[in-house]
Amino acid sequence: MTEDADTGFSRDEKLALVAVLDEVIPPSGERGMPGAGELGLADAIAEAARANPAMRDAIASGLARLDAIAREGGAVAFATLPAAQRTEQFQAVSAEQPGFVPNLVFPLVTNYYRNPRVLEALGLEARPPFPKGHAMEPFDEALLDGVRRRPKMYRDC
């Protein structure tokens, strides 16, 4: 498995991650809520994991274990399992590796609940929340140059 330079996850890990995201937040047909996996949130998780190597390691370890268990059972990969088997294996690995799911939750929930499809399914307008949203200009880091040029204004302890 080669690692994707953009995501830090291999192709197989990314496929498993998409399936895992639907286990954490499954689609709800009666409420019209999409599953987290179908929203393309694996890239957001990979972005957060790229900035935090411990998070990336915990997630990659869980994904590798899920694929290994699936292969032991004769499947090609975790993502190819029927939904009931995925749920069972996901719950087993979550209990076996307590850092796996907690490392997914924060970036998953923050990205899920700002997705336009989710906001619309909740009956909300897909826009910034206050007041009626404001367009913001991109931040210009050059504004900090004066502060960066100042001498140290504190003493070492």
Image: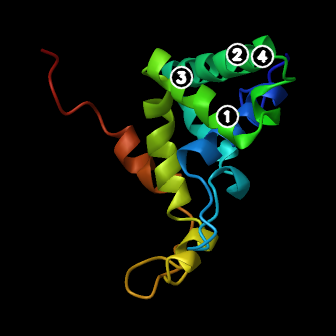
Going from N to C along the chain, the mark reached first, 3 or 2, is 2
Q: Give me the C-alpha separation between circle 1 and circle 4.
A: 12 Å
Q: What scheme was used to colour the molecule?
A: rainbow
Q: Are marks 2 and 1 in contact (CB under 8 Å)?
A: no
Q: Are marks 2 and 4 in contact (CB under 8 Å)?
A: yes
| Residue labelled with disc 1 | 86
Q: Are marks 3 and 2 in contact (CB under 8 Å)?
A: yes
Q: Position of residue 9 (x, y in %)?
A: 73, 27
Which residue is painted at 61% across and 36% down in the image? 87
Q: Give me the C-alpha separation between circle 3 and circle 2.
A: 10 Å
Q: How many marks?
A: 4
Q: Give me the C-alpha separation between circle 4 and circle 3.
A: 14 Å
Q: Position of residue 15 (x, y in %)?
A: 78, 35
Q: Give me the C-alpha separation between circle 2 and circle 4.
A: 6 Å
Q: Taking the image as drawn, is residue 4 in sight?
A: no
Going from N to C along the chain, the mark reached first, 2 or 1, is 2
**Amino acid type indicated by mark 4:** Gly
Which residue is painted at 44% across and 43% down in the image? 106
**Amino acid type indicated by mark 1:** Arg
On-image quarter of the C terminus: top left
